[in-house]
């Protein structure tokens, strides 16, 4: 309990927020690294996922490649890329974490398009829409929640794993874990961990809001409303109980 209180005291100490190595600067670096990684993964994975989901081809290959990429140890890949490129900048971890983020983005893209009812697509083709129009005007709007879900999963992994990339001399919140370990400042290490957790929770909350907002109104309704027509034989005004035909009212 004492360690946790000391960690929160370190986080809320104004002296730790100023300067190039302060919390504000490290937080900005972490957000920038994560955003850049997510953008690169989306640029690579989304077009491939859309093509697979729209045509239905190479789905098995995509699943196999995604599973293989998920099995790669991120820390080992970061160190390996740094050694073979002789580069200690953000490039090796950026490459490694982009590879890590591709599988969930890819899965969200092709599973989102595959979830669209085939009858809806057939109806769009029957109306004379081209394949590109079907993709842009039918499949993508209906599959956006799952696509955003894939990006959400990738974003959480990226935010959490960029802390590991601080084994190289790069910025981000992971610096507090490695620098604190070097000088045995455990309040700094635990405080850095708390900041990463807080950032991951905020990221998840923002994506959850976006995921809810992109649901089409017809899908959000869930069920077709029960529209009841009035009985043409029932008079307006106060309700009158039904009587057998031929009886006096």
Image (tube, grey):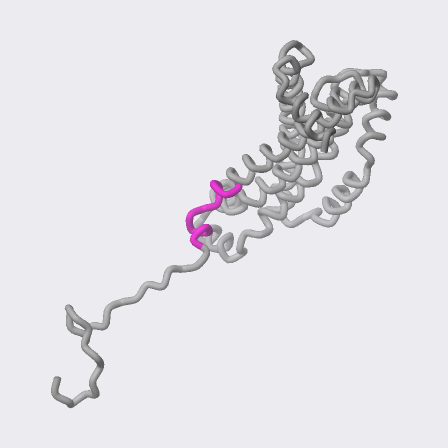
Q: Quadrant of the N terminus?
A: top right
Q: Is residue 8 above or below residue 136?
A: above
Could you say which is closer to the camera, residue 154 or residue 112?
154
Q: Is residue 120 left or right of residue 89?
A: left
Q: Is residue 240 left or right of residue 185?
A: left
Q: Quadrant of the C terminus?
A: bottom left
Furthest toward the top, the residue is 19
Furthest toward the front, the residue is 2
Residue placed at 22% from the left, 81% from the top?
242
Could you say which is closer to the camera, residue 173 or residue 243?
173
Which quadrant of the view contains residue 224? bottom left
Which quadrant of the view contains residue 235? bottom left
Could you say which is closer to the camera, residue 175 or residue 60?
175
Residue placed at 79% from the left, 18% from the top?
179
Residue placed at 47% from the left, 41% from the top?
213
Furthest toward the left, the residue is 248
Q: Position of residue 201 (x, y in %)?
A: 61, 35
Q: Does 215 appear in magenta?
A: yes
> Principal SS element in the magenta part?
helix
Residue placed at 51% from the left, 38% from the top?
210
Visible in this render: residue 244? yes
Q: Is residue 144 left or right of residue 101?
A: left
Q: Position of residue 211 (x, y in %)?
A: 53, 41
Q: Is residue 249 left or right of residue 156?
A: left
Furthest toward the bottom, the residue is 246
Q: Does 243 appear in magenta?
A: no
Q: Is residue 244 above or below residue 139?
A: below
Write the start and end of the magenta stretch as one range.
211-221
Q: Position of residue 197 (x, y in %)?
A: 66, 32
């Amino acid at each position: 309990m004492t360690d946790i209180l000391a960690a929160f005291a370190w986080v809320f100490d104004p002296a730790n927020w100023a300067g190039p190595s302060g919390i504000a600067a490290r937080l900005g670096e972490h957000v920038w690294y994560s955003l850049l990684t997510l953008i690169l993964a989306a640029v690579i994975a989304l077009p491939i996922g859309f093509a697979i989901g729209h045509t239905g081809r190479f789905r098995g290959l995509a699943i196999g490649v995604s599973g293989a990429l998920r099995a790669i140890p991120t820390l080992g890949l970061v160190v390996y890329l740094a050694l073979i490129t002789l580069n200690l900048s953000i490039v090796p971890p950026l490459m490694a974490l982009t590879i890590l983020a591709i599988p969930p983005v890819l899965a969200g893209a092709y599973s989102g398009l595959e979830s669209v009812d085939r009858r809806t697509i057939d109806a769009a083709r029957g109306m004379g829409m081209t394949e590109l129009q079907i993709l842009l005007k039918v499949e993508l709007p209906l599959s956006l929640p799952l696509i955003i879900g894939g990006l959400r999963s990738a974003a959480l992994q990226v935010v959490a794993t960029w802390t590991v990339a601080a084994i190289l001399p790069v910025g981000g919140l992971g610096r507090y874990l490695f620098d604190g370990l070097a000088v045995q400042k455990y309040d700094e290490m635990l405080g850095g961990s708390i900041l990463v957790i807080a950032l991951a929770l905020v990221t998840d909350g923002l994506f959850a809001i976006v995921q809810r907002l992109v649901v089409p109104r017809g899908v959000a309704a869930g069920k077709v409303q029960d529209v009841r027509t009035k009985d043409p034989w029932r008079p307006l005004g106060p309700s009158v109980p039904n009587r057998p035909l031929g009886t006096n009212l």
